[in-house]
Image (cartoon, helix red, strand yellow):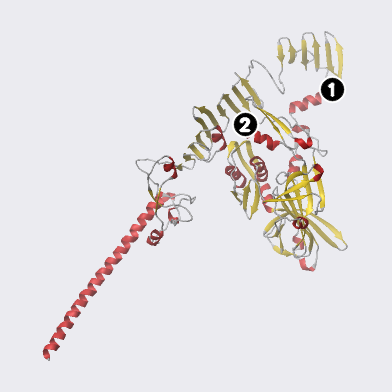
Amino acid sequence: MIIVKDLLQNEEALTDFNEFTRVRKVNGEKTVSMTVIPSGNNEYSYPMVEEESTVIHDDEEYIIKKMSERSVGKRTIKRIDAVHKFYVDLINKQQSKIHNGSITFNNYMNLVFDGTGYSFLAEDAFGAEEFENLGNDTRLALLAKGLERFEAELELVGTQVRFKKRIGNDTDFQFRYGHNIKTIERSVDTTNLTTIIHGKWKDGTELTYRSPNADIFGEIEAPLFTDERFKSKSTRLEAMKKSLNDTPEFSIIIDFADLRAAGYPYTVPNEGDSVFVIYEPMNDLLIETRILEINEKFDANLKPIKTTVTLANYKKTFAGTMFNNVQKQLRKITNDDGMIKYDVLDEAVRIATEALQSAQTELIFDNGIIARDKNDPNKIVLFNSAGIGISEDGGQTFNTAMTGEGVVADVITAGILRGIVIQGVEINGSEFNTIGSSSDVIRIVDGTLVSKSGDDQTTLNSGTFEIKTKYSNGYGRLLISPQGFQFFAGETEDSINRYLGNFTFAIGPNYSDWVTKIFSTGEISTNDNMYANDFITNSTEDIKQDIEKWEENILEVIKNADLCKYRLRADVEKGIDHWKYGFVLGQKFNTPGHVLSDSGSAIAQYSMNSLSIKGIKDLITENEQRKVENEQLKSKIAELKTLVSELTNRIVAIENAK
């Protein structure tokens, strides 16, 4: 069933529609479209089919963003295109915060989804990335940027967004192009094909990677790779490989029924599923493609009648056609012909270009060559053996001049300005470098000052202060930012660069196994022993809420709990043979939920102590009850003794009477 909901939240079932089509893409896009015909069956729902109304199908909501009406006889039919509500919600919500520097995947996605009503789950691990001026944009734009930088893909399940490095199934299924499967549409593009790439870095390293496909297409050079973010040889070589487009951009649209008949293992296609295509026209080139788009057409009963899939070896950017999202931004910088507007160009370049192109000048040969503006005689340029001068007061003064003594100017706009000494009050620009020796550099770029000497580096900007250093057996990193104080120490440079959690102090051999962490939340985590004269827990009433007396009898919980003895693996690795006793968290062990930490991955000592005290209290209560019962039993026994004595005396009296 299809439901339509108007802006007043009224809902009606929608009938008498045709050409209902749903499109799903691996770049995250989900849309539906259909034609709605007015009839007696939809007299209430048909008027609700308007722009910004909601269409509900398969428990998913789509917002109508395009609608056209066309008269057919005496009726007016409507054609609509609707976008999944998720994308509309994100494009309509701004993130005003600005972040500079490194940020983890989880912290990045918190910027995207905070306050949107959506949650997220990272099913794969993603390293931290560096960003400048991140934020002040729509949540959808931030999500698109994050997916690109972290190289992630998403699946939407209800209101939860799940991230993976790659969605879909690796099927290992392959078929030969042109055999048994009819192609509806085919596209092969070799425009950006490259098969060999060279890399060069400031530390003198030079690398070359040659693709095996160079044997097929020849050696086609890619632009020089110079990305300084990659430090080791292996990461640089891997980055070079990823940047090389050594396979033609290949895509075909086929009927999914044909693909199933050829042996495709799944009944229903999924975005991202991999399919290998043997492409005969290019010497049996094996191309790994993925299902990038699924186009499903339904009948009036919402039964699928035709499904086509697009197989391609390239992926469009996230939400690339999300109803003018990009066009809205492009209109700010281009005119109707697609030309860049002047007001987006650098102002100095624009003024200079217009002045040179529109100049109406006459030349006068007097004490050199004088070029005078016909419309404003006060504007002249003088060229003679002493130099070149530019004046706006008829030659009385030359505020801009170049002579043997040097250059005088109110404003100089240049791509590169080289000099030995620069004296002045203020220097504005995007990048400023001073180099002392081959390894000592001070750089100012986009408001950030970087001082580098060998392996030591200090970074300072308006938001953060950072120091990196190398010592005899490892690396250290100090970071001070609005988020707090963070210090990292590890054995490799990669360990202190790649991992930035929400902790402020970390020491350990590598980024995945920090021994000790102090978190910005105040938590401390360690894989080793911790010593203190006392551990004091704040437990005042003012920091707690929903306070209730703990009435549950806990003895049965304690009785059923599994207490184990064990040795720590870290101790065994160090040669320490010492047994410990306590709870073990795992599926095979029964551990009371009362003592688990918030994450469920550790034991909360305060809760553990409280559980023990509660058990003692319950024992005391039971003991007191037994005392009362014992007193009652004693009284009963005394009564019974008295009764037995009386009965005995009676029996004796009866016997004596005989």
Q: Residue at x 59, y 26 (%)?
A: 450
- Residue 330 falls in which quadrant of the image? top right
Task: Residue 615: give x, y in percent of width and height.
Answer: 36, 58
- Residue 77 falls in which quadrant of the image? bottom right
Picture disc at residue 613: none
Picture disc at residue 233: 2
The amino acid pointed to by label 2 is Lys
The amino acid pointed to by label 1 is Ala
Q: Indicate the secondary structure of the residue bearing disc 2.
A: helix
In the foreground, 259 or 299: 259
In the foreground, 73 or 394: 73
Using the image, determine if residue 553 lies above or below residue 289: below
Is 567 left or right of 213, judged from the image as shown? left
Q: Which residue is mark 1?
A: 359
Is 636 left or right of 64, judged from the image as shown? left
Task: Residue 67: give x, y in percent of width and height.
Answer: 78, 54
Is 44 left or right of 239, judged from the image as shown? right
